[in-house]
Image: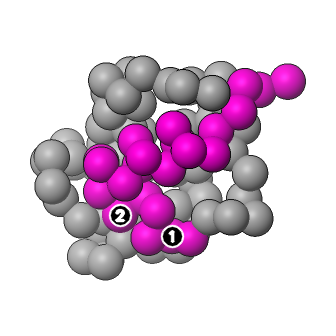
Amino acid sequence: MNLDSAAIRNVAREVVAEITGRPLKDRQKLVTSGLVDSLSVLRLITLLEKKLDISIPPETLQPEDFDDLDLIVETLQRVAVPAK
């Protein structure tokens, strides 16, 4: 599945703002900075799946795959599949 990177970025910004209560900057680190913890990563994944109508297989993921916008885009373009 080839998701549009701009769509992923927009939804990821929206979801991170919802989780953290603050806007996400382009190169801002989420996990390694402590802004988002492991439970919040799970919530981030769930919200991304819902808003983008995709499924993200959990077995290949690490929290670091969601550490910044570029990594979120790369990860989703690599592993996301259409929701059933």
Whether residues under marks 1 and 2 lie with C-beta atoms below 8 angstroms apart, the answer is yes
Relative height, residue 17 to residue 64 (above, below): above
Instruction: Based on the picture, tell me whether residue 69 belongs to the magenta stretch.
Output: yes
- Which residue position is annotated with label 2? 67
Q: Is residue 15 above or below residue 83?
A: below
Q: Check the picture and name the quadrant holding the N terminus.
A: top right
Left or right of residue 75, residue 34 in this image: left
Q: Quadrant of residue 82?
A: top right
Q: Which residues are magenta?
A: 62-84
What count of labels does the image hold? 2
Residue 44 drawn at (x, y percent):
51, 50
Which amino acid, mark 2?
Asp
Residue at horizontal 37 percent and vertical 54 percent from the top: 71
Residue at image location 19% in from the left, 43% down from the top: 23
Question: Quick check: is 9 in the magenta stretch?
Answer: no
Residue at numbered disc 1? 63
Please provide percent x and percent y for residue 65: 46, 62
Question: Alpha-carbon neighbours of circle 2 within 10 Å: few (<14), some, or many (≥20)?
Answer: many
Label 1 SS: helix
* Amino acid of disc 1: Pro
Toward the viewer: 38 or 2?
A: 2
Q: Main secondary structure of the magenta part?
A: helix
Disc 1 and disc 2: Cα gap in Å?
7 Å
Quarter where residue 37 is shown: bottom left
Residue 7 shows up from this direction: yes
* Residue visible at 75% across and 65% down in the picture: 59
Residue 46 visible in image = no
**Furthest residue in direction right, as rendered:** 84
